[in-house]
Image (cartoon, rainbow, N blue to C red):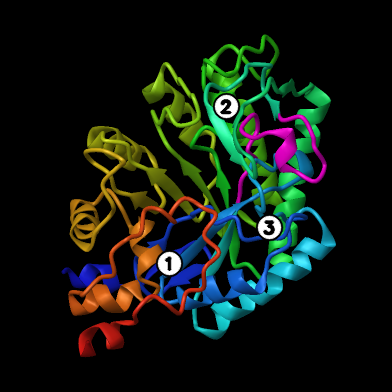
Amino acid sequence: MSEKLFEPVTLGKLALRNRLVMAPMSRNRATPDGLATELMATYYGQRAGAGLIISEGVQPNVVGQGFMNSPGLHSQQQTESWKQVTSAVHRAGGLIVAQLMHAGRIGHPSLYPSAHQSVAPSAVTAAGQCFGPEGALDYQEPHALTVEEIAQTVKDFADAAQNAVEAGFDGVEVHAGNGFLLHQFLAENTNLRTDEYGGSIENRVRFAAEVIEAVSERIGADRVGVRISPANPYNDIVEGDTAALYEALVAALPPLAFLHVLEGGNRSRTEALRAQWTGTIILSPHPENLGVPVTAETATEALEAGVAGAVAFGAAFLANPDLPERVRAGGPFNAVDTTTFYGGDHRGYTDYPTLAEAVSA
C-alpha cells in the first residue's frame, strides 16, 4: 500500500484529507417523493472517512427521476431533508458533494408519483428494461425535449446546485455519463436532432457544456465536478466518435474542481484525457474491464502512474464503511454482497463488521 493514497489533495474549494473517494452508487432509499431519510444519513455518516463522498444520483427536477425511491433536490422539502445527511458527514469530519443526475429516457412512468413520460434529446426508445415493484418493465418512447425545455432543464440543474449548497453539501458533481441525459445528448444513437443541439460534435456537446457552465456560475466552478464515462455502452449508448467527442467536451469545460472519469478498459484514453485536462482527475480505475472492483493496489497504481489525483472506490466502500482505515491496515476487508449492491437494499449497516471487530474475531 502506498502512502500516496493518504496524502491530502485540494480540488478547488474541497480540501480532501486523503485520496480515497467514495464513488456514487444508487441505493433507492429515499421516500417516494424524493426525500432523504435517516437511513441515508447513517449510511453516508459511516463512510465519512473518505477524502470525499460523491452521493448517489439526485434528480434536479421531476422528469429527471429514473428510478423508484431516488432522492431529489428540486423542492424545499427535499433540500431540508438532505441536511441530516450532510450534517452526519460533517460531524464525522468528512466532505460530501451531491451528484446531479437526470436520467433522461431511462425509466418508466409507473415508477414515479408523477407518472411522467421520460424525456430525451430525441424520441428514441432505449433497449432493455427497468425494474419496478411488479418486475421488469420495457422502456417507453421518450418525449424529445424542445429548445425551450432544454433551457428550462439547464436552469433546473443550476437551481438544484443552489439547493445542494443550501442543504449543506460541499459542492456538486454533474453526471454526464452512464447513458443518462447529458450522455444521451453526446451519443450519436440517442441524439438525432437537426438543430443546434444535434448533428456535429460541437452541437452534441452543447447541452452538457451549458449545464456545467450554468451550475458553475450559480455556485462557483471551484465547487463543481463532472463525471464522464467515455465509450461506456451502458443504457444502450453508442457514441461513435469517442476520442473527438471528449476532446471537444473537455475543451468546453470551465476550470472545475475535478473531472471524474469512469475508465472502461482503455488506459490510453485516460492518458489522453490526463494530457488535456489541466485540473485534478478523480479516476474510477478499470484499465481492463468495468467488472473488476477497485482495490488499493489498482488505486495506488493509478496515482503513481500520474493518471489520477484521487481514486473513486465503489463496491469496496459499500461493504467496508471504514475503508480508509482498512486500507491503511492492509485489511481484512468485508466481501461485497453483489445481491444487494445495485439498489433496493434497505437493511441496516451495523451488520458489517468494523475493522476492530474483524481483527479481534
Residues at badges 2 and 1 in contact (C-beta under 8 Å)?
no
Name the residue located 32 percent from the left edge and 42 percent from the top edge: 274
Amino acid type for the residue under numbered disc 1: Thr
- Residue 347 on image: x %, y %: 52, 68
Residues at badges 3 and 2 in contact (C-beta under 8 Å)?
no
Q: CA distance from mark 2 to mark 1?
A: 31 Å
Is residue 4 rendered magenta in the image?
no
Which of these two is toward me, 310 or 252?
310
- Residue 212 on image: x %, y %: 62, 42
* Residue highlighted by disc 1: 10
Q: Is residue 307 visible?
A: yes
Give the extent of the magenta segment. Answer: 100-118
Q: Is residue 278 above or below residue 82?
A: above
* Residue highlighted by disc 2: 184
Q: Earlier in the sequence, mark 1 or mark 3?
A: 1
Amino acid type for the residue under numbered disc 2: Gln
* Residue highlighted by disc 3: 219
Q: Earlier in the sequence, mark 3 or mark 2?
A: 2
Q: Is residue 29 above or below residue 118?
A: below
- Helix, strand or loop for disc 2: helix
Q: Is residue 207 above or below residue 57?
A: above
Left or right of 355, for residue 201: right
Q: Is residue 167 visible?
A: no
Disc ID at residue 223: none
Q: Quadrant of the N terminus?
A: bottom left
Q: Quadrant of residue 96?
A: bottom right
Q: CA distance from mark 1 to mark 3?
A: 18 Å
- Residue 86 on image: x %, y %: 62, 73
